[in-house]
Image (spheres, rainbow, N blue to C red):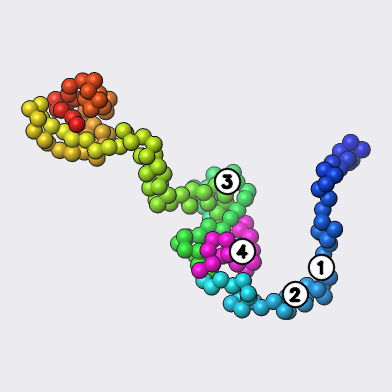
Amino acid sequence: MTAANNKIRRAPNKRPHPSKGVPLSSERVALIKATTPKGKNHPMWAGDNVGYSGVHIWLTKNYGKASKCMFKNTTCSGKSNVFQWANISKEYRRDVNDFIQLCRSCHAKYDYTEKQREITRKKSIGKVPGNIRSIKQYTLDGKFIKEYKAITHAAKELGILRSSISNALAGVSSMAGGYLWR
Ligand SMILES: [Zn+2]
């Protein structure tokens, strides 16, 4: 090791706390262990409804850190070396069978549930209200035919270009696919 990379840079006011890194004596550790109530008797015990953080602490303590990805031989890209416990039911119960070990990448995909997809969808609807709005189809003499949930639905079903329907709705053109649109 050279003198240059031996240099330790430390901000002058950021000295570690004096007791930091100083291990407790084994007697002290034994005393703490012996006097702290376990599990349900522990003062911080929050029952089975412990929430995300509590149950993860409990899990790591009892079953160790996640160290593999369950999707290793299937969908895992194998790029991540960070492994995590992923909850199956999303109820975060104190039940090891309700957890699987996944890498960070697979975990993110795993947690991206249908519910969250729905939220994302709703958010995107809010941003572009014009894209997903129900539209009504009329004959050229103004008789109502059908209502569609979105332009894309009508376009797909009738084989009309989306842009034609949009133009008709915006008044750029009078009709699209031989129909009036409102
Ligand atoms: Zn993975």
At mark 4, the secondary structure is: helix
> Percent x, y for residue 54?
58, 64
Residue 100 in view here: no
Q: Which mark is residue 24?
A: 1
Residue under the point 73% across and 75% down: 33
Eye-nearest disc, 3 or 2: 2
Residue that label 2 marks? 32
Residue toward you, 149 or 94: 149
Query: The residue under label 3 is which amino acid type?
Result: Gly
Q: CA distance from mark 3 to mark 2?
A: 41 Å
> Percent x, y for residue 109?
49, 48
Query: The residue under label 2 is which amino acid type?
Result: Ile
The quadrant in which residue 31 appears is bottom right
Q: Quadrant of the N terminus?
A: top right
Magenta-drawn stretch contains 80 = no
> Percent x, y for residue 108?
52, 49
Whether tag 1 and tag 2 are in contact, CB under 8 A, the answer is yes
Q: Is residue 127 above or below residue 111?
A: above
Q: Earlier in the sequence, mark 1 or mark 4?
A: 1
Query: The residue under label 1 is which amino acid type?
Result: Leu
Q: Earlier in the sequence, mark 3 or mark 2?
A: 2
Residue that label 3 marks? 78
Q: Earlier in the sequence, mark 1 or mark 3?
A: 1
Q: Earlier in the sequence, mark 1 or mark 2?
A: 1
At mark 3, the secondary structure is: loop
Eye-nearest disc, 3 or 4: 4
Residue that label 4 marks? 57
Residue under the point 25% across and 25% down: 170
Kindly tell me whether mark 3's CB lies below 8 Å from ligand 1: yes
Which segment did they paint magenta? 49-68
Query: The residue under label 4 is which amino acid type?
Result: Ile
